[in-house]
């Protein structure tokens, strides 16, 4: 059951989260750094293996009784081997890597225009992501929309335990520590949909704490953001209105904020723009009615140990609720 | 040698150093060989348990969304895999091995504080049982390095993490005791004439390791006590909401944790140096280089701990410093590797299972070292941290630097431990199967880390491209398990092998001058040493300055009922005094048991029990210190 | 490369009659290294948490009163002298002087502990409101535990001094206690300095909170 549904997520929703297919300048810089180091390591490994093999294979006419080397100094050839292989080679490699470290670090810091990046605040929770656009006053969860081709500055922290924020195709990761706010600059070169993950063990469902990053052309992004400043309109259609009432009666409002409907709470993700999200459960299932019904009725069957309890509802009630949620663009 | 007094018969000396085969004798055993073997046997059991956890975890990860282990069970299994391997297997086995072999290697009869040695073992055993008792109550699930706030009172309210904190802290006492023993032995109890520069390289490795233990472990003890009282008493050291810091734990842990991995590495590479030198039929090339690099590694190991924290958000300047310092290990390791290569170059190779494992270790260690160097480059670390790339790296260095050398050491020193040889044919199968299995397990993990797979995930979503690597890795673990079981089989089978000669490999250091198995008193007469490889370079172990020979002779005369060893000067190895050692004592296990009771009291908030345990511990310590019968000859009690 | 160490260290035999250190002394020396590391970890903990905060002490708490702590530190420092005297008395086998010196050391040690605990009863905060409070009690608490063990060792030696066959034990034990007590006194005085003086001299953060080392 679960396997079949989850199959559809990755194929449909986002690209594979491979840091070797970089989609932004930070990730490209890191990928190049890796390949330089890889070939360097290969060269060193091959050279050392050749020397090792030679040293084993070469024949010497020594009796099997051990040589008596009482007081003998190190033979000249061995000295050069020690000095060359053991000191000079690693020192050279080390210095080269230090240079690479400094230059790549500088590259990553210089990313983008320092004066006007778009700021996105992300707070980690067990096991979901709270996303805010402070300048626009927009709040969402588990999915981050960003303008392609512009640098985005993420301010990250945690509301409970340590999490970590990583979008492999866009750059490196940064920890989300309670009591601290860390900064990470990322940029997506092209429009696309990328997968992000939590990369610090945070508890029972750490494995399923993913998020989606959607990069859109800048003007589309600006329009998207502007549209979401105002609270969503009240539903007009009957089923959705029923769902709206159910949203309060079934106590969804205690954990989930919908702008204009429930006050700011943070026990679960903000649902104000839920309909435009691609996944449910922080990157686990595609956001489709069947999945949504299953999730609402028993989230513990899909993501055991997460904080959302099962909600006992009849089929009609679930349909109404889903109809309402679908109005929350 | 004196002409007037007769030499003691071996049986006299053997009787003084023997222990009665009674329960009292078994409990009260303080001789290093018995204690060392206990460490090794117990360590093997924990190795198999830790390996079982690894097997379970990897079975769960063979395919996406399997349900062999549920999320909670998996999190407990990976935590206990790390805890068992890191705390209950690696360090105790290395300690135990050092406890067994070092007195033989440096030419004496026992460690200088035999009751402390015994205490170290009992603490290890009881702490191990304590930790595994968690399976009856609640298993720790915070990972082997237990980051806060997850492991604090708010997010881990049950007993699980208390087992971790109390058990690991208890265990560290055992390691500190071993560290003190080993340093004291190597500084003061070497054979007369063994100047510090004639000490075998394994001795240097253990000397530096001992110091690392002394300066690294106490920090974790302090940090763990602070966390435990946060959990039990309500202090807020690690609570950022009221002035504490979650990052403080990381500093406290990794100040211990990074040197810890060099505690794992140095004995392994020390053993490899001894083995390669024997099977290349030549003294190790570059002895002084290797000693220098061992010391440098020991000191440098304290200067890089922040490289476990590059993604925490610390200032770039700070972490760049630690990154640069981490890269310097490449130079230290390079010297060690090239000393081995130079030795092989000069020598004539004799193949044997220990040699196979040693060469396999070197190759594996180099791979792990290369991936480690990449992780020291800070920006790359931001990519690879907390992914399977790191898992691959540290398993490569642990397996190459510690586990394969342990197998090499087992095959090499088995005749000293048990008196018999391990089967060479089985050994070769053991080696090849284990090597194939281990590389198949961990090589793909580098790749899947790049593909985004984080550490410590109980399962993964399908379609992300992670499947083939996980499957390969699981198959690898199954193959490795076969390799390990072959070793266990070979170990059992060796009981029926013929007794081995004193020096089956033709090696050059002192331990090979003893019979196999080693007699109770180790040496009939304490050796006098003039070189690094006494069995290769000295015609006799008994020639030396007149007064040394005379004094050593008096020690072996009949009528000596006490256990006596000698002390020598720290640098020059000049004979100084004769010291008497205890023969049997019940205090070590009693004291250890009382501490265990106190910890159980703290664990379950039964403070009356905790207090009683503390008082009882103090009483036992008093009994231990008070002049008693521990030094008396056993048959006079 | 020649065997440099071999050539440079010509055998330096200790002249006959010069006492070598007992084996137990080496063990205690190494144990002292462990203790020193413990104290260093305590200092680090204090400074790290201080650096992670803006105001120190936190709002609403006054910097600590120094009277009792100063008295405690003085008593602790002073206790090193009778330990030294006890060492000399033991070497001279002057048992009465030995017992007096040990008792004085124990009394001063006990006094330093009592004054510190008295200070604890007089502060208005506890361990659980803020890390400042946790540090205030727990770090000196570690030290008092270490000192307490030292006092127990001292009491044991005092008792042993009446035991006829304990001369060797007394010899090793006194030298070991001296090592132990010196590090405890030094580490403890420094710790009291850290806990009681830092809130007076380092009240405002150097950099914004959260920008740790």
Image (spheres, coloured by chain):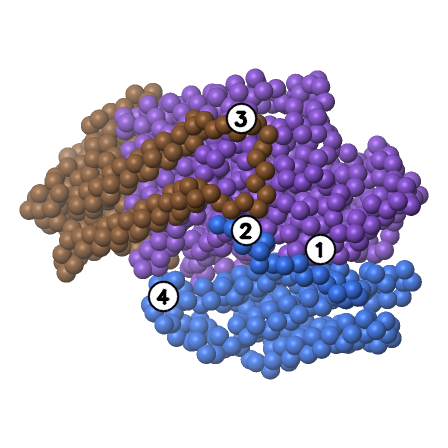
Chain colours: A brown, B purple, C blue
Q: What chain letter is assigned to the residue under label 4?
A: C
User: What is the number of the mark on residue B574?
Assistant: 1
Q: Which marked residue is nearer to the observer: mark 1 or mark 2?
A: 2
Q: Residues within 10 Å of mark 4 (few under 14, many from 20)?
A: some
Tell me which residue sits at (50%, 41%) in the image: B285
Question: In this figure, which residue is indicated by the disc labeled 3?
Answer: B350
Cα distance between the residues tagged 2 and 4? 54 Å
Determine whether B382 is above or below B519 in the image: below
Q: Which marked residue is nearer to the observer: mark 4 or mark 3?
A: 3
User: What is the number of the mark on residue A196?
Assistant: none
Task: Looking at the picture, tell me which residue is in the foreground, C112 or B568.
Answer: B568
Marks 4, 3 in one chain: no
**Contact flag, marks 2 and 3 (Cβ < 8 Å):** no
Question: In this figure, which residue is indicated by the disc labeled 2?
Answer: C3
Determine whether B342 is above or below A99 in the image: above
Question: In this figure, which residue is indicated by the disc labeled 4?
Answer: C209
């Amino acid at each position: 059951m679960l396997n079949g549904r989850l199959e559809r997520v990755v194929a449909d929703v986002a690209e594979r989260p491979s840091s070797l297919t970089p989609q932004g300048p930070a990730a490209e810089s890191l990928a190049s750094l890796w390949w330089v180091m890889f070939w360097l390591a290969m060269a060193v490994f091959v050279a050392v293996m050749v020397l090792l093999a030679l040293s084993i294979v070469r024949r010497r006419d020594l009796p099997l009784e051990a040589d008596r080397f009482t007081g003998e100094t190190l033979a000249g050839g061995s000295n050069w081997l020690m000095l060359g292989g053991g000191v000079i080679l690693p020192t050279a490699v080390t210095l080269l890597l230090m240079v690479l470290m400094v230059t790549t670090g500088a590259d990553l810091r210089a990313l983008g225009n320092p004066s006007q990046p778009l700021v996105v605040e992300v707070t980690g929770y067990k096991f979901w992501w709270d996303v805010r656009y402070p300048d626009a006053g927009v709040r969402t969860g588990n999915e981050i929309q960003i303008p392609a081709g512009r640098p985005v500055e993420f301010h990250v922290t945690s509301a409970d335990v340590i999490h970590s924020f990583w979008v492999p195709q866009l750059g490196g990761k940064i920890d989300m520590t309670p009591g601290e706010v860390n900064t990470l600059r990322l940029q997506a070169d092209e429009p696309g949909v990328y997968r992000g993950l939590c990369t610090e063990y945070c508890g029972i469902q750490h494995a399923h704490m993913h998020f989606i990053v959607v990069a859109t052309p800048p003007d589309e992004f600006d329009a998207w953001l502007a549209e979401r400043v105002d609270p969503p309109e009240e539903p007009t259609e009957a089923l959705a209105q029923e769902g709206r009432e159910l949203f309060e009666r079934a106590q969804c409002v205690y954990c989930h904020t919908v702008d204009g409907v429930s006050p700011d709470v943070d026990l679960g993700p903000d649902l104000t723009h839920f309909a435009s999200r691609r996944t449910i459960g922080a990157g686990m299932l595609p956001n489709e009615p069947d999945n949504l019904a299953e999730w609402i009725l028993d989230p513990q069957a899909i993501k055991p140990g997460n904080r959302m309890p099962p909600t006992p509802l009849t089929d009609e009630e679930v349909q109404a609720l889903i109809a309402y949620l679908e109005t929350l663009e | 040698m004196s002409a007037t007094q007769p030499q003691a018969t071996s049986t006299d000396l053997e009787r003084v150093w023997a222990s009665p085969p009674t329960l009292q004798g078994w409990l009260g055993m303080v001789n290093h060989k018995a204690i060392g073997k206990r460490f090794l046997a117990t360590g093997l059991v924990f190795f198999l348990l830790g390996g079982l956890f690894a097997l379970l975890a990897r079975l769960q990860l063979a395919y996406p969304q399997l349900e062999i282990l549920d999320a909670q069970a998996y999190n407990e299994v990976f935590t206990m895999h790390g805890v068992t391997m890191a705390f209950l297997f690696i360090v105790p086995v290395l300690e135990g091995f050092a406890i067994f072999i070092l007195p033989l290697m440096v030419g004496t009869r026992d460690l200088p504080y035999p009751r402390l040695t015994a205490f170290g073992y009992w603490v290890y055993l009881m702490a191990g049982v304590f930790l595994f008792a968690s399976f009856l109550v609640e298993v720790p699930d915070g990972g082997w390095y237990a980051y806060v706030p997850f492991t604090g009172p708010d997010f881990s309210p049950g007993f699980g993490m208390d087992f971790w904190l109390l058990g690991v802290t208890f265990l560290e006492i055992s390691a500190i005791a071993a560290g003190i023993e080993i340093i004291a032995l190597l500084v003061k109890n070497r054979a007369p004439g063994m100047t510090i520069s004639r000490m075998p390289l394994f001795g240097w490795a253990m000397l530096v390791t001992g110091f690392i233990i002394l300066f690294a472990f106490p920090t974790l003890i302090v940090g763990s006590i602070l966390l435990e009282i946060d959990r039990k008493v309500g202090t807020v050291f690690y609570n950022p909401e009221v002035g504490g810091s979650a990052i403080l734990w990381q500093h406290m842990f990794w100040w211990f944790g990074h040197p810890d991995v060099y505690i794992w590495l140095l004995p392994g590479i020390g053993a490899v140096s001894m083995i390669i030198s024997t099977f290349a039929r030549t003294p190790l090339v570059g002895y002084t280089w290797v000693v220098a690099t061992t010391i440098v590694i020991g000191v440098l190991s304290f200067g890089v701990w922040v490289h476990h924290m590059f993604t925490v958000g610390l200032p770039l300047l700070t972490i760049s410093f630690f990154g640069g310092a981490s890269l310097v290990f490449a130079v230290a390791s390079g010297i060690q590797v090239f000393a081995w290569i130079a030795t092989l170059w000069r020598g004539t190779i004799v193949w044997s299972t220990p040699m196979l494992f040693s060469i396999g270790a070197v190759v594996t260690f180099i791979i792990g070292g290369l991936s480690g160097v990449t992780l020291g480059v800070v920006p790359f670390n931001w990519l690879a941290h907390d992914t399977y790339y790191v898992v691959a790296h540290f398993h490569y260095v642990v397996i190459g630097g510690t586990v394969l050398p342990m197998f090499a050491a087992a095959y090499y020193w088995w005749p000293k431990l048990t008196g018999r040889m391990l089967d060479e044919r089985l050994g070769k199968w053991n080696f090849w199967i284990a090597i194939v299995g281990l590389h198949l397990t961990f090589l793909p993990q580098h790749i899947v880390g790049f593909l985004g797979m984080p550490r410590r995930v109980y399962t993964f979503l399908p379609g992300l491209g992670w499947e083939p690597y996980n499957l390969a890795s699981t198959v690898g673990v199954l193959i490795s398990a076969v390799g390990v079981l072959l070793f266990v089989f070979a170990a059992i089978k060796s009981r029926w092998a013929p007794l081995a000669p004193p020096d089956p490999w033709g090696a050059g250091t002192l331990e090979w001058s003893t019979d196999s198995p080693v007699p109770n008193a180790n040496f009939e007469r304490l050796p006098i040493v003039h070189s690094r490889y006494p069995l290769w370079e000295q015609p006799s172990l008994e020639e030396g300055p007149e007064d040394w020979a005379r004094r050593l002779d008096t020690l072996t005369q009949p009528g000596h009922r006490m256990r006596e060893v000698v002390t020598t000067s720290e640098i020059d190895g000049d004979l100084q005094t004769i010291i008497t050692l205890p023969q049997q004592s019940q205090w070590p296990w009693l004291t250890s048991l009382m501490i265990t009771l106190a910890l159980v009291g703290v664990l379950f908030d039964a403070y009356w029990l905790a207090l009683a345990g503390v008082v009882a511990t103090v009483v036992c310590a008093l009994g231990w210190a008070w002049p008693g019968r521990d030094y008396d000859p056993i048959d006079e009690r | 490369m020649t065997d440099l160490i071999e050539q440079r260290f010509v055998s330096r035999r200790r002249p006959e009659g010069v006492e070598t250190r007992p084996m137990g002394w080496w063990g205690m020396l190494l144990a002292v290294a462990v203790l020193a590391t413990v104290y260093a970890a305590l200092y680090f903990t204090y400074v790290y948490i201080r650096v992670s905060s803006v105001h120190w002490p936190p709002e609403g708490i006054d910097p600590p009163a120094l009277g009792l702590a100063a008295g405690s530190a003085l008593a602790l420092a002073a206790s090193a002298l009778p330990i030294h005297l006890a060492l000399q008395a033991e070497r001279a086998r002057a048992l009465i002087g030995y017992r007096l010196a040990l008792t004085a050391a124990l009394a001063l040690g006990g006094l330093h502990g009592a004054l510190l605990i008295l200070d604890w009863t007089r502060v208005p905060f506890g361990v659980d409101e803020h890390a400042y409070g946790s540090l205030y009690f727990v770090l000196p608490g570690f030290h008092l535990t270490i000192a307490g063990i030292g006092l127990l060792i001292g009491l044991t030696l005092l008792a042993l001094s009446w035991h006829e066959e304990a001369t060797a034990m007394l010899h090793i034990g006194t030298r070991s206690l001296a090592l132990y007590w010196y590090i405890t006194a030094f580490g403890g005085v420094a710790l009291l300095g850290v806990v009681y003086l830092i809130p007076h001299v380092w009240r405002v953060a150097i950099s914004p909170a959260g920008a740790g080392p």
